[in-house]
Image (cartoon, helix red, strand yellow):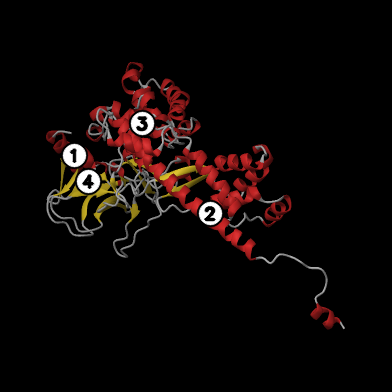
Amino acid sequence: MSLPELEQFLSWFQNSGGTIDRDAIGFKYFSSAEGGRGAVALKNIEKDQTLFTIPRYLTLSSKTSTLPEKFGHKIWKERALDKGWSGLILCMMWEDAQALNSKWGPYLETLPTAFDTPMFWSEKDLQELEGTSVVEKLGKEDAERDYHDKVVSAIQSRPDLFPPGTITIHYSLERYHVMGSRILSRSFDVERTNTDDYTGDEEMNTDADRSTGNAMDVDVHDEQAGKEDNSIRAPEDEEEDEEDGIDVSMVPIADLLNARFGSENVKLFYEENELKMITTKRISAGEQIWNTYDDLPNNELLRKYGHVDILPLPGGAKGNPADVVEIRADLVLSAFSSQSGTDAASSAERIDWWLEEGGDDIFVLETDYEVPEAIASLTRLLCLSSDEWEKARGKGKPPKPKLDSPVLDLIIIALQKRIAQYSSTMKEDEQILETKEGMSFNKYQAVIVRLGEKRILHTTLQRLQNLLAAEKAKSDNTQKRKPVSTFEGPSKSMKKARR
């Protein structure tokens, strides 16, 4: 965005009811390592200062766009456009097609049209992410299925709203992915209020089924009590958001701010009629103003935003302190089957019960290298004898997460299987980064992601192997201390006592 475009956008924002402290906040281009375009403090700013406010009606969502109303709310719901992101994407494409006739025209012109996220990578580049959770979470096939099954049919049913001559320009699959990526990388969740239908300029109607929403988090701000609600989280399932009273929305100005691990100095708060960006600490003049992604791991940063965080780690390495790696429950089941000689089907009843009782099917390892209690509990469940299994089921309680030798053995095997899912070793990745000359940026970021996951796996594995060795040594020592039985009848003292 050039300076004239920025000024035009800021004028639109203020003329539309937004406010911004132009003496305190400015916008500039930083290096790519610092996030590119972002906001900067023009003077020293104290904590709890409001930098800008956004009226709720100025947020763009399927609740504020007029398209669902023009389409007909009943038909909109019948076509399931109120579920998932397809409806919001269609709203954004339609508003974009209206150009400056749309209330959000000047805002939409500021949004990116190209992305570095894996959604747009080539198959060759995606292969570099083999073994990570990034590719399976892209949801590209599901998104394209929604486009063809829901969006295209909706567009074709209303040529009055979607003139056939505009389809290839504004409603193509490519535009659908671009709008979806805009939502993924820039949207916010805002909890609904009782004044939540913001389709008019400044008029709001009360409707229990309406509101606005976020992919970054937004907190409640109570100016009188000074409280905030930190329970809001970035959603993966918008159907869940419908039930939880959360809507996904684009929020002008707020999405210009960058984010970096541990750097947050402002946060977006919501109130009845507006959202406020408020400083959470003192910011010195010249400092970048950082919002928060809730300190996401690199695999999520890359998937959503197309970048990774590289910071100093304990021990001299560099990476993201928030990195995680996922272990699927089927790896634990596979480890048990290989050790016990049974097939997975024989454990199906226990797995079904585990899931029905609310057990996890994915376990997350973090940089504290602790074993999640849930994975230990599931492993013990698989190891129970038939009688023990019936007893546990009768109580309706999974086993305690005790890390004894059988459990440690199986979790170690599961981690080894997880490591084997990568196409390169940890050492090979470290060597790749040492000699990165000529490497594509996509490959570089992919190596950073998978190396971060492997560090967690290898360190956790080493820790468990040490625990197992200690358990076995303890068991061996106990066996050595046990007296050898030479019982041949009552001792003399015992005989005397009997008399």
Above or below — where is 479 with respect to 218? below
Q: Do the CB atoms of the residues marked 1 and 4 lie less than 8 Å apart?
A: no
Residue kind at label 4, given as amino acid type:
Gly
Judging by the rendered image, the residue that carries numbered circle 4 is 18
Judging by the rendered image, the residue that carries numbered circle 3 is 118
Q: Do the CB atoms of the residues marked 3 and 1 lie less than 8 Å apart?
A: no
Q: Do the CB atoms of the residues marked 4 and 3 lie less than 8 Å apart?
A: no
Judging by the rendered image, the residue that carries numbered circle 2 is 469
Foreground: disc 4 or disc 3:
3
Q: Name the residue rendered at 59%, 62% in the picture.
A: 477
Q: Position of residue 392 (x, y in %)?
A: 68, 55
Find the distance from the CA under tag 2 to the CA under tag 1: 48 Å
Q: Residues within 10 Å of mark 1 (few under 14, many from 20)?
A: few
Foreground: disc 2 or disc 4:
2
Q: Earlier in the sequence, mark 2 or mark 4?
A: 4
Residue kind at label 1, given as amino acid type:
Ser
